Image: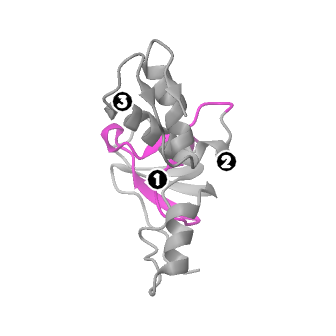
């Protein structure tokens, strides 16, 4: 644990009090276990959920009290760019829990990769690596093709 001074958000940022943070067993735990030197705290963590404490002057769509998913390091508070084009802070819909919402960047990756794959209706798709993102990719690639696609 490292104590740091609480940052104020810039005009295009929000300050988020984190409630849940997703730990990646593949990248974070593996890197911490097998690298000779510690992993930089700046690159550890990428998916937090919490409540907005303060919005920058240039942010009109996210307000204090909003529940959000904010990409950023594991921390009690994070400051993240929140302009619509920044794509790193999302207001959570009612009914989506904080724990489930930490998986949004991984779901987004599965959907993006399904759109990038050069598949056509009727193609057979083999997903290698049936870990979390592979399992999120499967329904996304199925949804993308109008006729049934066989996923193994």
Residue 110 drawn above or below residue 21: above
> Can you identify the residue that label 1 sits on?
71
Secondary structure of residue under mark 2: helix
x, y percent for residue 72: 46, 58
| Residue 26 at least partly seen | yes
Q: CA distance from mark 1 to mark 3?
A: 22 Å
x, y percent for residue 69: 53, 46
> Can you identify the residue that label 2 sits on?
99
Q: Name the residue located 69 percent from the left edge and 31 percent from the top edge.
A: 95
Q: Are marks 1 and 3 in contact (CB under 8 Å)?
A: no
Q: Is residue 82 magenta?
A: yes
Q: Earlier in the sequence, mark 1 or mark 2?
A: 1
Q: Name the residue located 52 percent from the left edge and 33 percent from the top edge.
A: 138
Secondary structure of residue under mark 1: loop
Q: Earlier in the sequence, mark 1 or mark 3?
A: 1
x, y percent for residue 28: 52, 68
Q: Are marks 2 and 3 in contact (CB under 8 Å)?
A: no
Neighbourhood count class around disc 3 (C-alpha, 10 Å): few under 14, some 14–19, many 20 upward: some
Neighbourhood count class around disc 1 (C-alpha, 10 Å): few under 14, some 14–19, many 20 upward: many
Using the image, tell me which numbered label, if any, was put on residue 115.
3
Rendered image quadrant of residue 115: top left
Q: Earlier in the sequence, mark 2 or mark 3?
A: 2
Residue 108 is left or right of residue 18, and the answer is: left
Q: CA distance from mark 1 to mark 2?
A: 14 Å
Q: Nearer the viewer, residue 104 or 115?
A: 115
């Amino acid at each position: 644990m490292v104590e740091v001074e609480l940052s104020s958000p810039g005009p295009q940022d929000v300050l988020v009090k984190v409630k849940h943070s997703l730990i990646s067993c593949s990248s974070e735990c593996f890197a911490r276990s097998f690298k000779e030197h510690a992993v930089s705290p700046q690159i550890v963590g990428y998916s937090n959920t919490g409540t907005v404490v303060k919005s920058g002057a240039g942010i009109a769509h996210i307000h204090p009290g909003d529940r959000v998913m904010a990409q950023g390091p594991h921390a009690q508070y994070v400051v993240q760019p929140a302009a619509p084009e920044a794509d790193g802070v999302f207001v959570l819909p009612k009914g989506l829990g904080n724990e489930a919402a930490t998986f949004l960047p991984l779901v987004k990756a599965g959907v993006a990769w399904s759109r990038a794959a050069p598949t056509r209706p009727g193609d057979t798709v083999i997903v290698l690596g049936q870990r979390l993102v592979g399992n999120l990719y499967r329904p996304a690639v199925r949804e993308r093709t109008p006729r049934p696609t066989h996923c193994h």
